[in-house]
Image: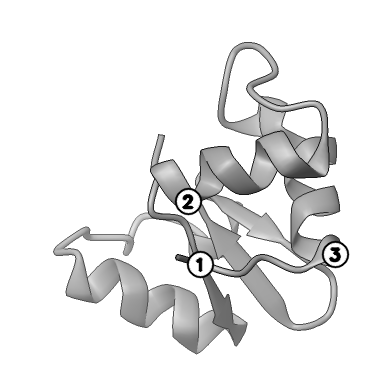
Amino acid sequence: MANFDKKVLDTFIKDQLQLFPEEVASTPEEAAEFLEEMFAVVVKGRRGVRKYFEEAGVDMSDGDILEASEVFDVGDGRYLIVEG
């Protein structure tokens, strides 16, 4: 079971519409449950994001990888990746 901290959960709740057409969670508990079901991950820095997508076999060479709708900037050097 993943353990998403308050900062990650708050970021997802605030920015979830960048990936989904409507809200999927409105409380930290709902967000944690949803992120666990989606197998979301938290990685450190741009390299962590790039490595995640490379390992998943996704070519992210077109544009800035951090601008992908699946990537949420937590604001402290970490990124939440949620595949919608």
Kindly indicate whether the residue at mark 1 contacts the one at mark 2 (C-beta within 8 angstroms): yes
| Left or right of residue 56, residue 65 in this image | right
Is residue 69 among the parts visible in the rendering? no
Q: Position of residue 70 (x, y in %)?
A: 50, 46
CA–CA distance in space, label 3 to label 1: 14 Å
Q: Earlier in the sequence, mark 2 or mark 1?
A: 1
Q: Position of residue 54 (x, y in %)?
A: 23, 74
Under circle 2, the secondary element is helix
| Left or right of residue 55, residue 81 in this image | right
Does 74 appear above or below 24? below
Under circle 1, the secondary element is loop
Kindly indicate whether the residue at mark 3 contacts the one at mark 2 (C-beta within 8 angstroms): no
Pointer 1: residues within 10 angstroms few (<14), some, or many (20+)? Answer: few
Q: Please tell me how many numbered marks the rendered image carries.
A: 3
41 or 68, nearer to the observer: 41
Residue 1 location, quadrant: bottom left
Is residue 52 among the parts visible in the rendering? yes
Q: Earlier in the sequence, mark 2 or mark 3?
A: 3
Which one is closest to the eye, mark 3 or mark 1?
1
Residue 2 image label: 1
> Which residue bears the numbered disc 2?
36
Tell me what residue is drawn at x 46 percent, y 56 percent. Answer: 40
Residue 59 location, quadrant: bottom left
Q: Amino acid at mark 2?
A: Glu
Tell me what residue is drawn at x 63 percent, y 69 percent. Answer: 79
> Which residue bears the numbered disc 3?
7
Q: Position of residue 52 (x, y in %)?
A: 34, 73
Tell me what residue is drawn at x 39 percent, y 76 percent. Answer: 50
